[in-house]
Image (cartoon, helix red, strand yellow):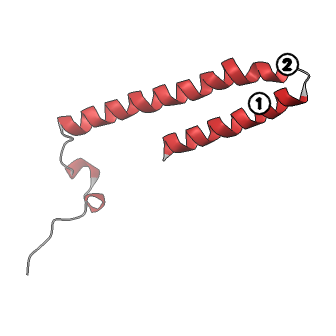
Amino acid sequence: MTVSPPEPHTIPIPSRPPKTWAQFINAISFLIVFDFGSLMINSSQFVFLAPLLLLPFPWARELYEEGIRYTKGAFGSLLG
């Protein structure tokens, strides 16, 4: 019968093995991509969608609502 190594979450934090360079680079690249994606979604809301609220036309409000729905979906995809 073989003995499997303990699960990482059962090891006390000070006793865990150090992170590798690959894990560190992966974390930094995720941070850059996630922050860039969030910034692009939020800036598109401010630049393209917020001015639509200033227009007094029904089509502008519909376009605004559709754009907000689209960017909410984009952010959900970014999280997933």
Residue 56 vs 30, above or below: the answer is: above
Left or right side of 79 for 66: right
Q: Position of residue 73 (x, y in %)?
A: 61, 42
Residue 75, given in percent of the width and then of the height, sits at 57, 38
Of 1 and 29, nearer the camera is 29
Q: Dividing the image into 4 quarters, which one contains the N terminus?
A: bottom left
Place residue 12 in its image quadrant: bottom left
Left or right: residue 4 compared with residue 49: left
Looking at the image, which is closer to me, 20 or 32? 32
For label 2, the crowd category at 10 Å Cα-Cα, with few meaning under 14, some 14 to 19 and many 20 or more, is few
Residue 40: give x, y in percent of width and height. 54, 24
10 up-or-down from 80: above or below: below
Seen in the picture, residue 19 relative to 38 is either above or below; the reply is: below
Element under label 1?
helix
Disc 1 crowd rating (10 Å Cα; few below 14, some 14-19, many 20+) is: some
Q: State the CA–CA distance, disc 1 to disc 2.
A: 10 Å
For label 1, the residue is 64
Cβ atoms at labels 1 and 2 below 8 Å apart: no
Which residue is disc 2 drawn over?
Answer: 54
- For residue 10, which quarter of the picture? bottom left
Q: Mark 2: which amino acid?
A: Leu
Identified by mark 1, the residue type is: Tyr
Residue that appears at 58% across and 29% down: 41
The residue that appears at 33% across and 31% down in the rendered structure is: 29
In the current view of this chain or complex, which residue is farthest to the bottom?
A: 1
Secondary structure of residue under mark 2: helix
